[in-house]
Image: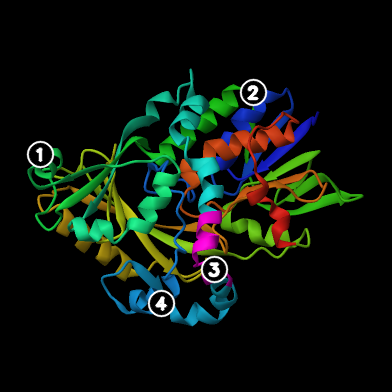
Amino acid sequence: MPENIIIAGAGIVGVSTGIWLRRFSDAKVTIIDRLPPGEGTSHGNGGVLAACAMVPVTGPGLIRKAPGMLMNPDFPLFLRWGYLPKLLPWLMKYLSNANDADTRRIANGLTTIVADSIDQHKALVSQTDAEAWVVESDYSFAYANRAAFEADAYTWGLRRDAGFEPVLREGEALRTFAPELSSSIGFMATMKDHGHIRDPGGYVKALAAVFEKMGGQIRQSKIEDFELTDDKVTAVLTSDGRQPCDRMILATGVWSKPLMAKLGLSIPIESERGYHIVFENATGGPSHPMMVASGKFVATPMDAGLRCAGVVEFGGLDAEASEAPFNLLRKQAKAAFPNLKYSGEIDWLGHRPAPSDSLPLIGQVRETGIFTAFGHHHIGLTGGPKTGRITAGLVANQPLNTDIAAFDPMRFA
């Protein structure tokens, strides 16, 4: 059994892994991150525990549709054109998966870590002070009309294959169920047995407190390199010096790429720049999380107000936030919820880690004792606890009853 374990990354995946490791073993477990827990991408997501979110963006037909998406100012896809030369190698790999066979392969893999999301979050927080952050709820998809829903038949077919069957509403039934919606929305598909988090950043901070209460340690520092002896990890090198370990878990999202390069692996992963706006103290919004299909954004009621998230931009890690994605979110939110009122706005930009094949990297790099747990694209919050449980089991030599071959980090060797 390992004695000294370091987890790089204090987001939902890293903190979940830490909690499960403390449950599985008596090893010393330390989480190291350049930011405090819950301050990065785990803070800024849509907050939905989207158990049915196993369908990747790269569905059949994406290559044909993409140029029109980029040129449409009302479509939530943005590109900083100066970044295109750097993006292009990743983009070609990404678009190569936009076919039926690869979409089904990816969906089957993602189902493994998202389909039981509610149960995994409940198991993570059971009998801890973090229980109250998890809310069981419906998750609805709002469409202009039945024809718009039927145009999504391929996606819904994959969800049904995974065991998810929506409740369909239109007309008077829809108005009674969701009176806050604009009259421009005439059809809704609602998934039962989903959930959301009242405040994702607060949730991860609460989980970090649970981890520390269990004897785990958290340090704020930047991990810069690994020390390996005979291709086995013996320490991580941080901005605060050398930290010895005999196992290490890499859960630093898109920032994992340069660290993987130090292990001789070039990982095709990009930042999918994600935007959100919290409409503070909002009234007139939805009572449960909704994906508004016309605007491709999620609206989730949270403690601070209504969070609207979902705009995508490609532009790397260094560029400042763009104003156009925020403006589009405002426009789309007000179009969907015409009676929305609020006291103020909180804007946010973060970096979703997007591997070229939309599958996270979960597993050991060779026999180094370094394990990966990153690359969750849109499903980090949803799949974080399951990933943490799997990763902790791998590190602590606990038997797995889950096939994780699809997530092998060595697939990019």
- Name the amino acid type tagged 1: Thr
Q: Position of residue 403 (x, y in %)?
A: 65, 41
Range of magenta residues: 93-105
Q: Which residue is mark 2?
A: 23
Q: Which residue is mark 1?
A: 176
Circle nearer the N terminus (1, 3): 3
**Among the 4 quarters of the image, the one containing residue 160:** top left
Compute the Cα span from label 2 to label 4: 48 Å
Q: Which mark is residue 64?
A: 4
In this orientation, which residue lies closer to the viewer: 291 or 225?
291
Q: Is residue 78 left or right of residue 12?
A: left
Q: Secondary structure at mark 2?
A: helix
Compute the Cα span from label 1 to label 4: 38 Å
For label 2, the crowd category at 10 Å Cα-Cα, with few meaning under 14, some 14 to 19 and many 20 or more, is some
Circle nearer the N terminus (3, 4): 4
Circle nearer the N terminus (1, 2): 2
Closer to viewer: mark 1 or mark 2: 1
Residue 96 located within the stretch drawn in magenta: yes
**Among the 4 quarters of the image, the one containing residue 162:** top left
Tell me the quarter of the image containing the C terminus: bottom right
Q: Which residue is mark 3?
A: 94
